Amino acid sequence: MMQFGNGRVVLVKFKYVLAAGALATVLAGAASGKIANPAGWSADEAKAIAAWPARKATGKIDPAIEIRIAKIVKGMTLEQKIGQITQPSILSITPDQVRKHYIGTILNGGGAWPAMNKHASVKDWANLADQFAKAAMSTDMKVKIPLIWGIDAVHGNNNVHGATIFPHNIGLGATRDPNLVYRIGRATAKQVRATGLGWAFAPTLAVVQNQRWGRAYEGYSSDPAQVALLGTALVRGLQGTLKGDGDVLASAKHYLGDGGTLNGVDQGETRTSARDLVNVHGRGYYSTLDANVQTVMISYSSWTMDGVPFGKMHGNRALIDGVLKRKLNFDGIVVSDWNAIEQVPGCKVDHCPAAINAGIDVFMVPEKWESFIANTVADVKEGRVPMARIDDAVTRILRVKFRTGLFDRPISAGRFTGQASALENRALAQEAVRKSAVLLKNDKATLPLKPGKRVLVVGAAADSFPMQAGGWSVTWQGDEINNGDFPTGETVLTGLRRVYGAGNVTFSADGSAFAPGKFDAVIAVIAESPHAEMKGDVRWPAPIGQSLQYPADLALLDKVGGKGVPLVTLLYSGRTTYTTDLINRSDAFVAAFLPGSEAGALADLFAATRGYDFTGRLSFAWPSTTCPTNGYPAAEQLFARGFGLSYAKARQTGHLVESANLTACP
């Protein structure tokens, strides 16, 4: 685990040992006592649970608080309890409905803002949050229970107009810098608190095995150790002490195996052994639980163990209740993903006793929350869901709310609430951009390109905030937006003009301004289209490659490359993807991944301003083929994980062997 203090990071080694005998139990509070180990684990479930090393409890349970919680739970009606476990979207509920139905938590997804105004001010956010918070404290309950609002703040508070947007996790993985990630966590928490919210749905702990996955960029690395290191740093940064003005709840997600689905299919099937599930996909949960993460979000994916299907994770009692709550002693909140319960066999979007019985505590039912409440009340009354299971869920919710200090002081009392200045941290984002870019090729010392040179910049992505920010930026997919939706930051074109002088930089999106002898260098900026889950998948058997998905990029490089003028290619992408044909047409090639709102900082790297050099190293292998398989074995790697060039250690790449031009993978 990691301890942070005075800006330093100290790594502490730890070991877990396999537990013998009965499963460890989690204190569920005095209201329901310790839930007895449920009978009826199948042999396969028992095998899956036994593979997990036991984790000692964190020791954070406060007996005095548990007694208070027990009294509150005992005095609640069934309807009040079900209201606490229900999480509607702000688009589908009003503050008065929060009061009437005793709602305990709400959320907004990407593309949801106060009054559906994507340019809503920080005060608009804070005012709406205050309305919801006051409504929760105006119920007829004997003890009023405060509300928590959660948001997908996955690379900064990326839904909010004017917030600095940091590089996505794939880029942060390339920095290998937990202290940087910790500081980004602190900055993000401050941004979230500025809007009056208290819960960030981050970090993603996916150990991505196939870059076909549309969410690949949400993973830090294919190395479980790096995922654990950086994910834990973000948790510590987001949560702080839990009670500070700049602290928010973090959410370790998506439990479990979301990065290992066959062929990278979003919400697909992860086929692996129980031991590999622990050692690869589970590693980040040990470290983040030790860092006191207070919520864990369940994955849409399913798991098959050695040919035995366990089904959708939202209904997997063995892994949620048996492993997470009992074997790993997690005593916080287990939350579902957006409408994910409907994927459990026998369930609907508003009705899923199987998911409740599996151990989920908070249910993200954004639209049909009223019928979910009614159905769940009926399930308890008719015996399909035990009252003890509901009491366990409510106890956990209250425990976390007490730990955050909500019963003593509302979020609105924090000093950052409503402050627009709390949304910006440009210097930190610029540092992250410089540290996350990876130099893949630099023949003939093409870079650094010293100021004073005449530069032609080509490619529409050079002046596009949406392209450099990617998915989960302003909107869910990062689409249907333009530069006007980013009031702060720099595109790389703006950064190049700052560094080289506006008179020395010519922008020609289609390359038509190119002429031999007119320029000292050409910088081509190419990119994937912004995308998030589902829409970003490259589905097998389609081959994967930048020029295959975006053939205009290859045509652009052919137009300006090989004409006697050095060509530097900059790629924005949410994945490592086949680019050998593009690299061969370039004298220098830089993978910037998705740098966020401060891509202009790349210009300082290109010019070696103040001695800046490339320090980023690949956190995923770079494929040499258009048909890579899960895990990217060595035979399919153009550049291994950890590869990256620098000015200090020059190296010639030369011509690379290109993959066959396939229309479908065999």
Image (spheres, rainbow, N blue to C red):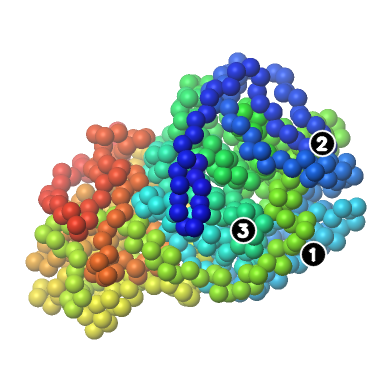
The structure residue drawn at horizontal position 74% and vertical position 45%, both measured from the top left corner, is 399
The label nearer to you, 3 versus 1, is 3
Residue 424 spot, x, y in % from top left: 51, 70
Callout 2 crowding tier (Cα within 10 Å): few <14, some 14–19, many ≥20? some
The label nearer to you, 1 versus 2, is 2
Q: In terms of sequence position, does the residue under pointer 3 or pointer 1 come before the other?
A: 1
Badge 1 amino acid: Lys
The structure residue drawn at horizontal position 45% and vertical position 61%, both measured from the top left corner, is 166
Residue annotated with mark 2: 30
Q: In terms of sequence position, does the residue under pointer 1 or pointer 2 come before the other?
A: 2
Residue annotated with mark 1: 134
Circle 3/circle 1 CB separation < 8 Å: no
- In whole angstroms, how far apart are the C-alphas of marks 1 and 2? 28 Å
Badge 2 amino acid: Ala
Badge 3 amino acid: Asp
Residue 581 spot, x, y in % from top left: 20, 51
